[in-house]
Image: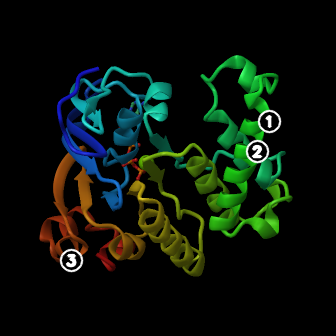
């Protein structure tokens, strides 16, 4: 790993990804700083999820670099990047449906200790009890922050989509990320749930200082809580700007043309 003295947070620069003849990403730069919610938007197939996969290390880039807190992690494994403070959620919800909400969050909190002394993991060493207390504390704190206490002992497979999205968020937070990538976190939520979810994200960023990079199709949510916003179209970087700049942009309007539901709100 090389130190480049770059910024605090995430910088992915000059990212190129080719799938056969298709150029999914063509020189894309995305930054995400702690204390901010950065938006990543663009029509279906623009390359947003592919960009997340490159940032996390699930997809190798043909060109470009990924830096975390000024450290080049382009060649590091996804697990290593996670340990360096990068977290994510997936476009399709991934919960353990037959475990309770509380168990889902606790398992994620425990997983931060993978790589620790194996005796500690087994709870045999002196530290074992301490780890358990710490996991319980983190779990309670996050259930509280996400407002999940009322459903903490329900099976994750039995809660509403909105609550499921909150469990997913709490699971990701349990790993203590500095930068958290959320792929369409509000999908399946109604307007009210989506608003509450947005307020929770703002609160988390303000109170805990983490940075969020968010892919989201709900433009009213994006324009309300994301700044700056990166716009992609067919793998190309269209623009980066404030909500007001994105709203006023003809280029963005054109990219969304034909997608009336989005265009109306841009
Ligand atoms: N593993 C893959 N192999 C081949 N093509 C792929 C692969 N993953 C993505 N693509 C293609 O790359 C392009 C970008 O896909 P991607 O999933 O990143 O878009 P997206 O912006 O997340 O879209 P959506 O808003 O629908 O989630 C699409 O044309 C997609 O079909
Ligand atoms: Mg996607």
Closer mark to the observer between disc 2 and disc 3: 2
Instruction: Bin the neighbour count of mark 2 within 10 Å (Cα to Cα): few under 14, some 14-19, many 20 and up.
Output: few
Q: Which label sits on residue 129? A: 1
Q: Toward which corner of the image does residue 60 lie, by quadrant?
A: top left
Residue nearer the viewer, 13 or 209: 209
Q: Is residue 66 left or right of residue 248?
A: right
User: Label 2's element?
Assistant: helix
Cβ of mark 2 under 8 A from ligand 2: no
Tell me, yes or no, if residue 193 can be seen here: yes
The quarter in which the C terminus is drawn is: bottom left
The residue labelled by disc 2 is 133
User: Label 3's element?
Assistant: helix
Query: What separation in Å lies between label 3 and label 1 (alpha carbons)?
Result: 51 Å
Which color scheme does this rendered protein use? rainbow
Query: Which residue is rendered at x = 85% and y = 59% of the image?
Result: 154
The residue labelled by disc 3 is 244
Q: Is residue 61 above or below residue 107?
A: above
Q: Are marks 2 and 1 in contact (CB under 8 Å)?
A: yes
The quarter in which the N terminus is drawn is: top left
Residue nearer the viewer, 166 or 136: 136
Tell me, yes or no, if residue 92 can be seen here: no
Residue nearer the viewer, 124 or 140: 124
């Amino acid at each position: 790993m090389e130190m480049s003295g770059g910024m605090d947070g995430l910088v992915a620069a000059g990212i190129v990804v080719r799938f056969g003849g298709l150029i999914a990403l063509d020189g894309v730069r995305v930054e995400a700083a702690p204390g901010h919610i950065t938006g990543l938007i663009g029509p279906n197939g623009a390359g947003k999820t592919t960009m997340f996969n490159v940032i996390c290390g699930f997809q190798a880039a043909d060109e470009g670099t990924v830096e975390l807190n000024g450290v080049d992690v382009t060649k590091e494994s996804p697990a290593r990047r996670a340990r360096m403070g990068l977290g994510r959620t997936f476009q399709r919800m991934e919960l353990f449906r037959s475990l309770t909400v509380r168990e889902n969050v606790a398992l994620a909190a425990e997983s931060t200790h993978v790589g620790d002394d194996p005796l500690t993991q087994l709870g045999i060493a002196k530290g074992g009890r301490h780890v358990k207390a710490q996991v319980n504390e983190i779990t309670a704190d996050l259930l509280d922050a996400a407002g999940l206490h009322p459903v903490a002992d329900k099976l994750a497979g039995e809660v509403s989509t909105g609550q499921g999205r909150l469990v997913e968020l709490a699971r990701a937070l349990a790993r203590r990320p500095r930068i958290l990538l959320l792929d369409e976190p509000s999908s399946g939520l109604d307007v009210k749930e989506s608003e509450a979810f947005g307020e929770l994200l703002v609160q988390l960023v303000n109170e805990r200082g983490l940075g969020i990079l968010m892919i989201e199709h709900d433009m009213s949510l994006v324009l309300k809580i994301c700044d700056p916003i990166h716009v992609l179209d067919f793998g190309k970087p269209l623009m980066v700007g404030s909500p007001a700049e994105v709203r006023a942009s003809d280029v963005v309007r054109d990219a969304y043309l034909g997608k009336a539901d989005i265009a109306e709100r841009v």
